[in-house]
Image (cartoon, rainbow, N blue to C red):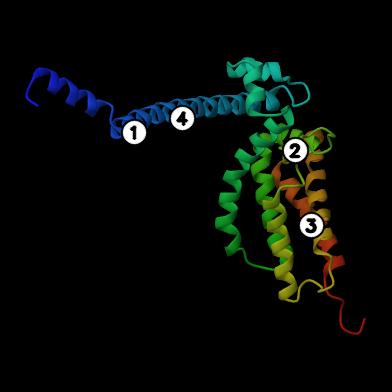
Amino acid sequence: MNSPQGKWLATGAHAGSPADGKHIRTRRQSALGGKLNQRQTQKEATRRRVIEAARDLFETVGYEETTVREIATQAGVAVGSVFTCFASKAEVLSQVMQDRLEDLYAELDRITPHLRGSVVDRLCSIFALHYAFETRRTPLFLAHIAAAYSWQTGSGAVPYGRNPRLRGMIYDCIADGVSRGEVAEEADIALVVDTLMAAYAWNYRLAAWEQAGPEQMSAVMERQINLIAQGFRPAAAGV
């Protein structure tokens, strides 16, 4: 068909083909995906601003004294935007601490396999590294400990004491001591971990009340570890 009308009909038939419809759907899906990616990027940017603002306020003003409205104001976002990212103030604190601890555990993952000495020696080293790190922002870590005793932390929060990385590190150190004969086989490792973490947290009172530094706190923790170790060491032969 060579007539102008025939050319028009052919073009029209081609424009309405299934292949053309597929291209239209692809363009729509691409546009929708672009909008979703943009919204996700904006939400992540808001989340980062909230975390940074909360970290500064929790340290300078205090966790209990800081309100969600103050966090939103400092972050430059609406209060509703804070709750879009986090279910509660406790979840904000939990995320602040998790972000900080990533740097610490990256360093510990590198160092821990190379620690030498007895179980007690390695435990002292692990806790000394924690004290050196956390005393850089003592008020923030005290807030983290205090939030662990709140009845309203929320399901998304990971308060002090539930951190699987710290608990796992201590547990593995003591379990290795069992295989090396330094820790009694019947020792309740989970209870030992709880006792050590309780002592570790309690020592932050020295930083709060006496402005103690990491060296002083580590020295106290070393004596506590040696005392606790008397309960998990194997009994001497013939006793």
Residue plotted at (44% across, 27% down): 32
Q: Which mark is residue 193?
A: 3
Residue bearing mark 1: 22
Q: Nearer the viewer, mark 1 or mark 3?
A: 1
Q: CA distance from mark 3 to mark 4?
A: 43 Å
Question: Which quarter of the rendered picture does the C terminus lie within?
Answer: bottom right
Q: Quadrant of the N terminus?
A: top left
Q: Is label 2 in a helix, a strand or a loop?
A: loop
Which element type, helix, strand or loop, lies under badge 1? helix
Which residue lies at the image location 59% right of the left edge and 17% below the top edge? 77
Q: CA distance from mark 3 to mark 2?
A: 23 Å
Left or right of 218: which side holds 101? left
Instruction: List the residue tagged with mark 2.
Output: 155
Relative to 123, is 184 above or below?
A: below
Residue extending furthest right? 239
Say which label, 2 or 4, has the lower sequence index: 4
How many residues crowd around disc 4 within 10 Å: few (fewer than 14), some, or many (20 or more)?
few
Q: Horizontal and vertical percent for residue 98?
A: 64, 40
In the drawing, what numbered circle is on residue 37?
A: 4
User: Tag 3: residue type?
Assistant: Val
Q: Answer whether residue 85 is visible to the viewer in this image.
A: yes
Question: Based on the displayed image, in which of its 4 quarters is residue 149 positioned?
Answer: top right
* Real-space CA distance between mark 1 and mark 3, rounded to the nearest whole angstrom: 60 Å
Q: Nearer the viewer, mark 3 or mark 4?
A: 4
User: Which three-letter amino acid code belongs to the residue tagged 2?
Assistant: Ser
